Amino acid sequence: MFGKKDRNRNEKSAGAKRQRKRVYWGYSILDYKGMEAYFEKMAGEGWMLEKIGELWATFYRETPKDLQFSIDVFEGSGILTPEETEEAREYRELCEKNGWHFVTSIKELQIFYAPAKENLTPLQTDEELEENLARKKVWRKDFSTSILVFLLTAGLVIFTRIRPAHQMDEYMGNIIYFFYPLMLIPTIIALIRSLLWIRKVKRQGLPEKEVETFFTGRKRQLLINVIATLVLGFLILGIVLDTLYNPHANTLSSLFPALLGITVGTTIRLTIQKIGKKKDDGIKFVIIGFLVMFMILGGFHYYRELQIESGIGDWDPNLIEEIPGDIEAYSMERILDSMGELELKRRTFPVLGQSFAVPKHYAQYETWEVEGRKWEVGIRTYETRSPWVAETIAEGYLDFQMGGILPWLGENWVEMEDLKEAWDVDAFYMTEGYPAILIKQDTHLWIIEGTHRVGEDPIEKMKAPEIERLIEEILGKHHYL
Amino acid sequence: MPKKQLKNLTEPMYYILLILNSPNHGYGIMQTVEEMTEGHVKIGAGTLYTLLSRFEKEGIIEALPEEDRKKNYVITKRGKELLEEEFQRLNRLVKDGRDILRGGA
């Protein structure tokens, strides 16, 4: 004789041996009527619905049966309401007593079945009430999500187009600029679908139970998901490339707050729906979730501060780096040769961002000392894929330097027509106060910043012979001044 | 947006409120409605649950302490007023109908 424990084990192992099938469950909640027909079709083919997850629906092998399915929108459901409340239990019990067997629930939807030949009272007997419920619980949720996602996507696309320069010299930025607009396609499809659904319901009532609706809906949803997954894949590629080639960009830590928000949000939602038991549990879990998130963010902020502090401590005023062999950095040593008694105090070649649009981006900073005064020059070089990229970065740099929307805080840069012509370049800009030069020629962009020992007027300073020599080195041309 | 107030009761609404003049639970209401109307009025479990939550929210009925895990409901004073109004409206309809269709008989 089997004890109770043994019997349970036997039942369990029988359950585990059951043949199961997982079906990709990318569907829109708006197609829930079509789902009923699909479950009936599957039951007829010997596959009975077991459960529905975020991505998959699981079916198990059964003898083919003629069943009727009914998916009901539950009045007591909501984003902050657990799926297994006392109310839900009571409601399912009521349905069971009427001959409808409960299978599973997914968010707002409760799924029941009964043998097809039984003439049962439908779960919903009042059309108007059913329509109101579907509008309130299904459509309103779908529409508000669609419009929110659309606005966020469009907002990011517009924002990156206002300041494209920021997106050019990192892989992640390139991907956001060039590929993220693709996300507008699925968001627009979802939004249009939501609007068409409600228009149809207003005119003809709730959709009919047709398996075709389900398949069309799933194809549409598949297209939406494929594009979204593709863009997500590109973004992950961006993170990987930036981590490998642009470690200073710290893409991961700049994405950290967003990733934390998504993780905490999803965890809160799943915890509420799957673990919560009472209606008020939702608010409790949201508060706990937010506290955890703020604690992690606080810790993260503190860690970054520590990192920055330790970084400052590492700054070496006498660091002289060797010229790296793999970049064609312009050596200012050659200029120094003609400048007499100068002592090189510091020289660095910082690693700067590179990307698809800007394959090479490097700099050289040097500090010399003469008669007790420091003389500093930095040259930043962008080797880009196209003149448009070089121009975009130049515009972005000038806009940022000139203070953007707060011009009184910025520097005034002047386009030097005579120097532009003299050097035969596309753009030649100089500052009025702080001595800096921006030169753009074809796909290349150079930004020279420095302090000088001769002359009082900053533009005069920039025309100092050593700077002209520098430009000559950079452009490989002789000056004509 | 303020919720639309109940104006006229539908048949199921009328019967639910009528039955809740004495305490009853979900399944009890369904069975009583079916018996009372000889199967003419049927209320689906989903519809009943939605109506009970809506009535409770609007203070037309109230839930009593649970007995044997069964939630019992009973009509409130407000609900009774609403039911009375509906009863009178229906009476007027029948009276007007009788005057014309049956010549006042």
Image: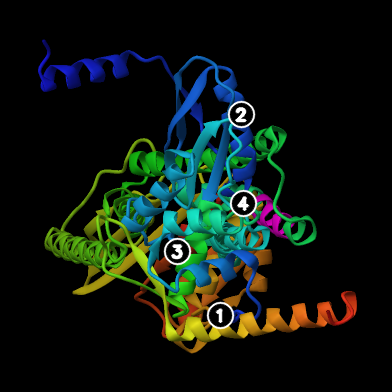
Crowdedness near tag 4: few (<14), some (14–19) or many (≥20) residues, C-alpha within 10 Å: few
Residue at the bottom extreme? A408
The disc numbered 2 marks a residue on which chain? A
Q: Amino acid at mark 2?
A: Lys
Q: Which of A168 and A111 lies nearest the eye of the viewer?
A: A111
Decide whether the magenta segment is chiefly helix, strand or loop.
helix
Between marks 4 and 2 in the image, the one whose residue lies nearer the viewer: 4
Q: Is residue B37 above or below residue B52?
A: above
Circle 3: element type:
strand
Circle 4: element type:
loop
Kindly identify which residue carries mark 2: A117
Kindly identify which residue carries mark 3: A448
Residue at the top extreme? A1
1 or 4: tag closer to the N-terminus: 4
Q: Is residue A403 above or below residue A480?
A: below
Asked if badges 3 and 1 are on one and the same chain, I answer no
The disc numbered 1 marks a residue on which chain? B
